[in-house]
């Protein structure tokens, strides 16, 4: 039995207001991308709170999909400023954190599908071998070979499915990297 854990540490930065920062060129483009990512993340949180179907559109939400989907424990730390000039940003951050707090969480133990399949096949193989030993004879040996071949085929099929899922993940990751350039 194989268990895995994942930790994602993300600094969401603040909203990048162009007129406040005075950014131009590439800095302005990156600020726009940051704002788009924060907007998408806010929409995902709102959808999750309402129990609606979620569309993980951009790189940030795709990276956080596992953490946000409700199948993991998620902790959010909101950094606030007491300064009057940051009132709107602080209020926006508090609203964002409030939505994050309302996210439904249903933590469950998830096993790697291939490892689970292999464990089940090994268990069934042992059971069938014990039945075979009880039966004895040439017919039993031939039946054992057929069963062994069947399970080997199922294992090959599972490995092919895993390779296909890994290729799909790599393609999705490549598409996400072609999106906004975020530092």
Image (cartoon, rainbow, N blue to C red):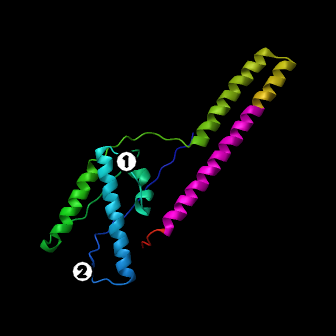
The answer to whether 164 appears left or right of 57 in the picture is: right
Query: In this view of the protein, can residue 179 be seen by the observer?
Result: yes
Which residue sits at x=54%, y=64%?
Answer: 174
The location of residue 157, given as percent across then percent down, is: 68, 41
Which residue sits at x=21%, y=59%?
Answer: 94
Could you tell me which quadrant the C terminus lies in? bottom left
Q: Residue furthest right?
A: 138
Helix, strand or loop for the magenta stretch, by majority: helix
Location of residue 60 by image quarter: bottom left
The location of residue 149, given as percent across then percent down, is: 77, 33
Which residue sits at x=43%, y=55%?
Answer: 7
> Which of the two marks, 2 or 1, is nearer to us in this view?
2
Viewer-nearest residue: 91 or 135: 91
Could you tell me which quadrant the N terminus lies in? top right
The answer to whether 170 appears left or right of 97 in the picture is: right
The location of residue 92, given as percent across then percent down, is: 21, 63
Magenta highlight range: 149-178
Query: In this view of the protein, can residue 81 be seen by the observer?
Result: no
Residue under pointer 2: 19
Q: Residue furthest top?
A: 135
Q: Residue furthest left?
A: 84
Residue under pointer 1: 73
Mark 1 or mark 2, which is nearer the start of the sequence? 2
């Amino acid at each position: 039995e194989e268990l895995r854990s994942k930790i994602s540490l993300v600094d969401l930065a603040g909203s990048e207001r162009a007129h406040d920062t005075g950014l131009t060129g590439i800095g302005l483009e990156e600020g726009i991308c940051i704002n788009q990512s924060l907007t998408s993340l806010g929409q995902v949180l709102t959808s999750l709170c309402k129990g609606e179907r979620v569309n993980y559109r951009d790189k940030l939400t795709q990276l956080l999909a596992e953490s946000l989907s409700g199948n993991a424990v998620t902790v959010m730390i909101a950094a606030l400023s007491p300064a009057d000039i940051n009132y709107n940003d602080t209020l926006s951050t508090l609203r964002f954190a409030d939505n994050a707090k309302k996210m439904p969480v249903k933590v469950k133990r998830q096993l790697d599908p291939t490892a689970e399949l292999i464990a089940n096949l090994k268990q069934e193989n042992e059971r069938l071998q014990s039945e075979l030993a009880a039966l004895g004879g040439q017919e039993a040996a031939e039946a054992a070979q057929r069963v062994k071949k069947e399970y080997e085929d199922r294992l090959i099929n599972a490995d092919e499915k895993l390779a296909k899922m890994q290729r799909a993940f790599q393609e999705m990751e490549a598409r996400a990297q072609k999106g906004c350039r975020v530092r």
